[in-house]
Amino acid sequence: MRCLLTAIAILMASCTSLKQGEHPRCERLNTDETIEHASGLTHGYDLELRWFKERLSQEEAKSYLWETCFGYTEQHKEDYSDYHYNKYKQQCQEWLDESWAPLEGQMREGDELWFYSTPDDMWGALAGQEGLALLRGCQLLARIITVQS
């Protein structure tokens, strides 16, 4: 089983700092210029502020990414041969290195990582998506799509 994962970097222009659990205080995200790096998943639409659910620390974000990729396999290790378990673990680590490292490298003091997820009706229409977004004010710097329907 393969993770539905990709890193999509988006270059984009600012608002106020936020408290934990609040939605970003922007009228809209700046997404004027977009550069995508995708392998498998595509976003097809701009993120909407109402989809932002929770602000995460760097450790929480990295843990979320690992759990999304490798959590099921780790919980059901007995269902896998040692070879397949280790191979999948290696693939997840490579994905994490490829997607997280560039995002982390862009981060500056005051930037925010957010978990986002589209509404239930979009999941039901096979247009759902969740992942992480890196914001600097109202500027979307990057996002990592972790699950897509």
Image: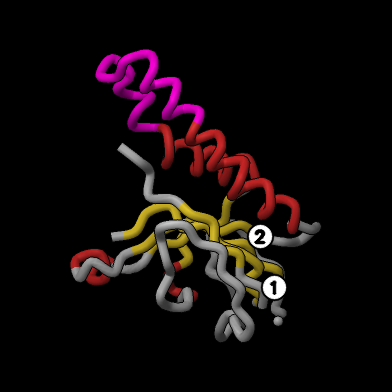
> Looking at the picture, does residue 91 appear above or below residue 21?
above
Of residue 59 and residue 41, the one placed in the foreground of this image is: 41
Image location of residue 25, percent across then percent down: 60, 76
Q: Amino acid at mark 2?
A: Glu
Image location of residue 8, percent across then percent down: 55, 62
Image location of residue 2, percent across then percent down: 35, 41
In the displayed image of the protein, which residue is found farthest to the right? 109
Name the residue beneath numbered marker 1.
Answer: 137
Q: Is residue 58 left or right of residue 70?
A: right
Q: Quadrant of residue 45?
A: bottom left
Q: Quadrant of residue 55?
A: bottom right
Of residue 66 and residue 119, the one placed in the foreground of this image is: 66
Name the residue beneath numbered marker 2.
Answer: 112
Q: Is residue 134 left or right of residue 16?
A: left
Query: Which residue range is magenta in the image?
Result: 71-90
Of residue 129 and residue 121, the one placed in the foreground of this image is: 129
Separation of disc 2 and disc 1 at Cα?
8 Å
Q: Is residue 75 magenta?
A: yes
> How many dots with numbers?
2
Which residue sits at x=46%, y=76%?
48
Which residue sits at x=50%, y=37%?
66
